[in-house]
Image (spheres, rainbow, N blue to C red):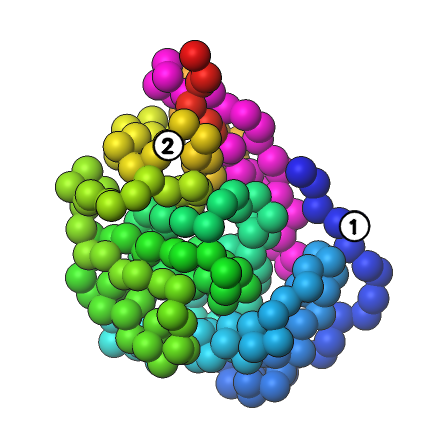
């Protein structure tokens, strides 16, 4: 599945000191860039995404959740970098592995209110932040779990697994294998094309596709590896 063509329009102006950008300025940038992707968002999505950025900035000073300190960069490197995989989600039950500061899970949950998300990370500091953000944003479609993926058990399998900051694809597949059904999809977010990692895909799985992602405002390489179980 490809992405809609971006519209050629003048970008909204940024404040000179983007770390002091107002919520309205952040929302303008978000609206422009999301519209350029051709996305239709729920009415409450934009304010919630802006509030999430504000929470990241606030908690980052204490918990060091992300190396990105600049609000404008958070828009591109965290929010938009998460939302570009939204068209590839399948089903209603989504597991975000190694969610860290809630990425990509929280932005995806905000724009997909009809899906149920489980955000999992073994770092208690980070899951405390996620839980706080979920509460302040009023997100009822997110469950937060503090546990290693190998030890996590679920009452039902997941339709889609996402992972943005995980280690090797091989380790991801082995970690989530017990949480999938035959039609589940794994969405492994990578930077450069992961040639070496692809050589070690477990034999029971295959790479269905590798999408080169176009993230507005980012020049860095982004790839989405789409993985499924082989059908017997």
Q: Which mark is residue 181?
A: 2
Q: Residue at x 45, y 30 (%)?
A: 183
Q: On the image, which quarter does residue 38 sit in?
A: bottom right
For the residue labelled by badge 2, is the local secondary structure a helix, a strand or a loop? strand
The residue that appears at 79% across and 50% down in the rendered structure is 5
Magenta range is 201-226
Give the left or right position of residue 111, taking residue 175 as reference: right
Residue furthest to the front in view is: 155
Kind of element beneath mark 1: loop
Residue 104 x %, y %: 44, 56
| Relative to 197, residue 24 above or below | below
How far across and down, in percent of the image, does residue 121 sit? 25, 53
Outermost residue on the right side: it is: 8
User: Split into 4 quadrants, where in the image is the N terminus?
Assistant: top right
Do we see residue 67 in this rendering?
no
Q: Is residue 209 above or below residue 23?
A: above
Q: Does the magenta stretch include residue 179?
A: no
The residue pinned by badge 1 equals 5
What's the residue at 38%, 70% (across, down)?
Answer: 140
User: Which image quadrant: the C terminus?
Assistant: top left
Q: Which of 66 and 99 is in front in this view?
A: 99
Q: Which of 29 and 99 is in front in this view?
A: 99
Residue drawn at x 18%, y 61% as measured from the top left: 124
**Closer to us: mark 1 or mark 2?**
2
Residue 214 left/right relative to 193: right
Q: Is residue 205 rendered magenta in the image?
A: yes
How far apart marks 1 and 2 lie (CA) works out to 34 Å
- Is there any visible trace of residue 32 in the rendered image? yes
């Amino acid at each position: 599945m490809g992405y809609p063509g971006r519209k050629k329009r003048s970008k909204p102006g940024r404040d000179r000191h983007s770390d002091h950008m107002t919520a309205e300025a952040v929302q303008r940038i978000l609206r422009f860039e999301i519209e350029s992707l051709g996305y239709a968002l729920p009415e409450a999505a934009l304010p919630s995404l802006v509030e999430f950025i504000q929470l990241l900035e606030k908690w980052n000073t204490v918990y060091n959740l992300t190396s990105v300190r600049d609000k404008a960069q958070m828009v591109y490197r965290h929010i938009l970098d998460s939302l570009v995989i939204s068209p590839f989600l399948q089903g209603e039950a989504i597991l975000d592995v190694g969610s860290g500061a809630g990425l990509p899970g929280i932005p995806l949950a905000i724009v997909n209110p009809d899906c149920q998300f489980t955000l999992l990370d073994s770092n208690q500091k980070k899951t405390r932040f996620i839980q706080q953000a979920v509460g302040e944003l009023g997100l009822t479609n997110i469950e937060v779990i503090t546990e290693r993926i190998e030890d996590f058990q679920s009452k039902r399998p997941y339709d889609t697994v996402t992972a943005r900051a995980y280690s090797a694809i091989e380790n991801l597949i082995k970690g989530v294998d017990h949480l999938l059904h035959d039609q589940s999809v794994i969405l492994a977010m990578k930077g450069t094309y992961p040639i070496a990692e692809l050589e070690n895909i477990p034999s029971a799985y295959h790479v269905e596709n590798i999408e080169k992602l176009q993230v507005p405002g980012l020049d860095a390489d982004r790839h989405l590896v789409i993985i499924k179980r082989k059908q017997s």
